[in-house]
Image (cartoon, rainbow, N blue to C red):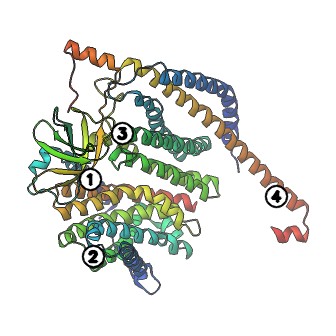
Amino acid sequence: MSALAAIIWRDVRLAFRAGGGALQAVAFFALVVVLFSLAVGPDIALMRKIAGPVLWTAALLATLISLDQIWRADREDGSLDIIVETSDALPLTAAAKAAAHWFSTGLPLIIATPILGVILNLPASAYVPVLMSLAIGTPGLSLIGAFASALAVSLPRANLLISIIVAPLYAPILIFGAGASIAGAAGAAQYAPNLMLLGAATLFAALFSPIASAAALRSNLD
Amino acid sequence: MNKKQKRMGMIVTVLAIAGLAVALTLTALSQSVAYFYTPSELQALAAPPASTIRLGGLVEDGSVNYSEANSASVSFTVTDGGASTIVSYEGILPDLFREGQGVVVQGSLDADGLLVADTVLAKHDENYMPKELADALKEQGRWQDGSD
Amino acid sequence: MASISELANPQRFEGLAQAVSPYAVGVAFITLVAGLYYALFNSPADYQQGESVRIMYVHVPAAWMAMFCYSSMAIASAVGFIWKHPLADVAAKETAPIGAGFTFLALFTGAFWGKPMWGAWWVWDARLTSVLILLFLYLGYMALWQAIPDKIRAARLAAILAIVGFVNVPIIKFSVDWWNSLHQPASILRADGPTIDGSMLTPLFLMIAAYMALFTAMLLQSMRNELVARRVARLDMAADAATSTLVETPSAASQS
């Protein structure tokens, strides 16, 4: 257990250091939100309606641009070979890497969401549903992202390929996450089922993504 | 913790996650994450939703009224057997729109509970047969209304 | 380099493909002509949908093939991954573009059916959305193959992706039962038997047979092409290696 905690702690520290990916993702998140509200213009009624889905889309895009980094640094300095060779349970290591990615990307995005919600005129009733759905859904994004990133680890500049691979796998999380934030803000009955399906998607990702990541890493290194 | 205990712990964790995921899915699917509401579901809501909604059901027989002033303006009742909702719509209806047929209507509720629709979609069911056969079945009284 | 089985199996496959291919093409042609004849001229109009029902005969088989191709691709991927069978890898790789084509055909014909019947080209209901996701899964799978130069590694990684993406297939199948969708529920594969009249089943089954035969013919041909291309690439590499060792000129050394 302590070895996994060490991996998470090391990755999070690296990500928050100067040049790390954590603040880049939050900056990108804010950029998308601001550009979107500029594009929509002064129609506040329209903005209030779409604020939840916009936050979800921006969070997904910000996660997407950070995925390439998950295994890249370890691959470049050679520590990935050591991790794969010495790990007695590679799926657990992959899960730890995904967790580290969530702590350094997903969690900062969630913390930034209330502030960006103000820019988007997010209705007061929508704050809890949006934050709740992001909290349940973003770990799934990190888990699935770690898998897609592991597939492309031996390729240089794989961001576009990772995006193409991960887009269909992210679709359910985006649908249920944005669906929950809309339904929750409107007080509709679909709020709970959407959150449950979102939770189920993240849990299924937690089951299968570490195994698939491990298989992808092994295939990439031999 | 020795290796065996660790392995047992892993298996228990994996089974717990899988069980929880399946339980969540089944619970969510038993409540509806619907593409549309039915009139009964709409009636059961504590507060009518403020935003755009979709309503699905059958067009009640004899309920379709074309406005005299404007032939493109139409009102009809959508029912699911239990409850019903009155819909008003202005525009071209799809070919399959007819009394007794399934529709999905998108729009917003006004203060009187009338659904002002901006889109009317016709829903067809899974039954396919030639017209003559459908007529013959109706004549013989063997027609099973596929309205569910 | 190439193991004995890797050389032997493609050769046996070549013989088999040469024997089967003409029949597959013939069956595809006959069933396609017969199916289209029945679909367009020799089947009744529907009691509800009228003549538009004829779109069903190109749409439903395409949608089935979209899911059938993905399932075959996932199975071939699993076989290739577990038993390291190169022919299974090639089969999976060559199934993807055909499956993507059928998926596109299903979406395209669906839009042309949806407009007159539902009143909309496209709606974001569960069935349509999950089939669109299937198309993107095919495209991602093909992009992954494209991106990785080493064929053996590409096969293993693409296989993992194909297997992971298989979760979408049951979601497509049951989407119309799980969610209130605009799309109709199943008409053929249901517990209480088909709800399509016999006179309409004839063209439908003929078209399914035509698409299956077409798929077989196209898959065999593109697998043969891929195997030939690989052999050419291997010969090229061997030839390059031979010339560069024979002619050790300074210019050749600096080029390589």
Q: Which residue is mark 4?
A: C241
Residue plotted at (25% across, 68% down): A130
Chain of the residue where label 2 is placed in the rendered structure: A
Q: Which residue is mark 3?
A: C173
Q: Nearer the viewer, residue B125 or C245?
A: B125
Residue plotted at (59% across, 23% down): C27
Q: Could you tell me how far apart the alpha carbons at marks 3 and 4 are, in whole angstroms?
A: 51 Å
Chain of the residue where label 3 is placed in the rendered structure: C
Image position of A206 with respect to A64: above or below: above
Amino acid under disc 3: Lys
Q: Could you tell me how far apart the alpha carbons at marks 1 and 3 are, in whole angstroms?
A: 20 Å
x, y percent for residue C122:
39, 47
Q: Which mark is residue B111?
A: none
x, y percent for residue A87:
45, 65
Q: Quadrant of the C terminus of chain C?
A: bottom right
Q: Which residue is mark 1?
A: B21
Residue plotted at (52% across, 49% down): C159
Amino acid under disc 4: Ala
Q: Nearer the viewer, mark 1 or mark 3?
A: 3
Q: Nearer the viewer, mark 1 or mark 2?
A: 2
CB within 8 Å, label 3 to label 4: no
Q: Which residue is mark 2?
A: A117
Q: Could you tell me how far apart the alpha carbons at marks 4 and 1 are, in whole angstroms?
A: 55 Å
Q: Nearer the viewer, mark 2 or mark 4?
A: 2
Q: Is residue A152 visible?
A: no
Q: Nearer the viewer, mark 4 or mark 1?
A: 1
Q: Nearer the viewer, residue C112 or A18?
A: C112
Numbered disc total: 4
Chain of the residue where label 1 is placed in the rendered structure: B
Q: Circle 3 sits in a helix, a strand or a loop, which is it?
A: helix
Q: Could you tell me how far apart the alpha carbons at marks 1 and 2 are, in whole angstroms?
A: 30 Å
Which sits earlier in the primary sequence, circle 3 or circle 4? 3
